[in-house]
Image (cartoon, rainbow, N blue to C red):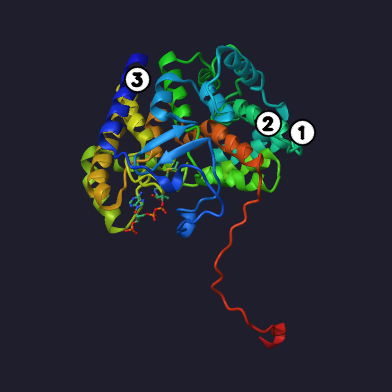
Amino acid sequence: MIDDIRKLIQQAAETARRETSDEPEPQFTGDVKYPVECQVGKGLEGAIATDTKVGYVNGAKGWLVYRGYDCFDLAEHSTFEETTYLLFEGKLPTRRDMDAFEEQLRGHRQVPEAVLDVLRRVPIDKTHPMSALRTAVSVLGNLDPDAEDTSPAKEKRIAVQLVAQFPTLVAAIARLREGKPVVAPRTDLGHAENFLYMMTGADPDPALAKVMDIMLILHADHGMNASTFTTMVVNSSLSDLYGSVTAGVASLKGPLHGGANEKVLYDLEEIGDAGNVPAWFARARETKRKINGFGHRVYKAYDPRARILGPIAKLITDRDPGTRKLYEVAVQLDHLVTSELGQEKKIFPNVDFYSGLVYRAMGIETAMFTPIFAVARVPGWTARALEYLADNRIFRPRAIYTGPVSERYLEIDRR
Ligand code: ACO
């Protein structure tokens, strides 16, 4: 299966190259001199908030680049650990660098028992796992004596530690939700393998571990999305990195952002059968309902991550008749939305459309999809927050005031 996955990624890359334009985006690339002139729409659409070398999303071309390397290349050849190193350090590691970095990550996997105690005390099966994760990250900060030290060296150590600890937290939340004991991390397994091991308590199938590794790579960074921007805004006030990442988790949870992967699965289940898609889609259009897993602020072409995740979902759901039916619903919905809204409104599937099917086929509970996204996104959040911190200026936009300006105060009894 691992060879099949590699071939699928190569085919997805070829299709992307063939089908997408090669439009340059001069307004979003090259050297920058402040102040920058740009057209800003509501929700900061089109606003340039900073410059970065971490990663680039070419929305017209449908291309995603981390530190100069395209996501197809990384998904095919890299590992999540190596991609994390790349995002942090700006270059691919040598063998020696990689060994040292992996050792560092493995050494940080444990979380303090006090964090697990807090998770055991929250009503874990009634609260959303992203809310539990938000609490857990915050408590990690309470327990770290270095949390208030915002020097680049300390924040770097905390960033690496958070990358290592997120899988442990998320797996603990998943297990506690099912009433099962928490599984401690192992140091003899890779990041994705160990994550699956802690979720299930069993040695993972190498093919599934490879798929999880690719999922993590593809979700590791994505421009100035809401949760990355949130993390950077909080960090720019020189608040602590735990607080910044806690805020990132809160932002990612929303269904307009990372929370969409969970909603997609509920929609596919609601539709139930590929034959029901046309009527469901017609109703969605009538009621102007936004279809979860479609549309994107930046991509006006097919999301390159969805190009890879679609075929992987097909491959992996082949092994499981239950999810296979949902996959058929998804393909039909993709086809209909893309043909009806692709040309007209540039609406295509985004990363969240097929990811849930992949997790579902691995036997993962739907509510855990967004926490897995968070496991993957810590490198992007923190690499960008650290890059910005090196030349920090607090984020502080303005709003256009549209209310009255000359009201006179009236005592309460005279109103
Ligand atoms: N289904 C149907 N129509 C859509 C969709 C959708 N999912 N998304 C956008 N449109 C339409 C809008 O109705 C609008 O049409 P109009 O011009 O006729 O009014 C047009 O496309 C532009 O949409 P906006 O809402 O202005 O796009 P915006 O950039 O503000 O929103 C967003 C982007 C939030 C992703 C939106 O597409 C959406 O809500 N998608 C569904 C939720 C989702 O999948 N989120 C995950 C995004 S990926 C990520 O964050 C990891």
Q: Is residue 346 left or right of residue 234?
A: left
Q: Return the x and y of residue 237 as percentages of the image width and height.
A: 69, 48
Residue 171, compared with residue 206, is above or below; it is below
In the rendered image, the quadrant that contains the N terminus is: top left
Mark 1–mark 2 Cα distance, whole angstroms, equals 9 Å
For mark 3, what is the residue?
Answer: 5
Q: Earlier in the sequence, mark 1 or mark 2?
A: 1
In the rendered image, the quadrant that contains the C terminus is: bottom right
Residue 172 is at least partly visible in this image: no
Residue at 34% in and 28% down: 313
Q: Which mark is residue 146?
A: 1
Secondary element under disc 1, as helix, strand or loop, is loop
Secondary element under disc 2, as helix, strand or loop, is helix
Q: What amino acid is at disc 1?
A: Asp
Q: Return the x and y of residue 11 as percentages of the image width and height.
A: 29, 25
- Confirm or reject: label 2 Cβ below 8 Å from ligand 1: no
Q: Compare residues 261 and 43 and report the one nearer the observer.
A: 43
Q: Return the x and y of residue 200 as percentages of the image width and height.
A: 51, 21
Residue 88 is at least partly visible in this image: yes
Q: Return the x and y of residue 108 as percentages of the image width and height.
A: 66, 22
Q: Are marks 1 and 2 in contact (CB under 8 Å)?
A: yes
For mark 2, what is the residue?
Answer: 158
Q: Are marks 3 and 1 in contact (CB under 8 Å)?
A: no
Residue at 72% in and 84% down: 411
Mark 3–mark 1 Cα distance, whole angstroms, equals 42 Å
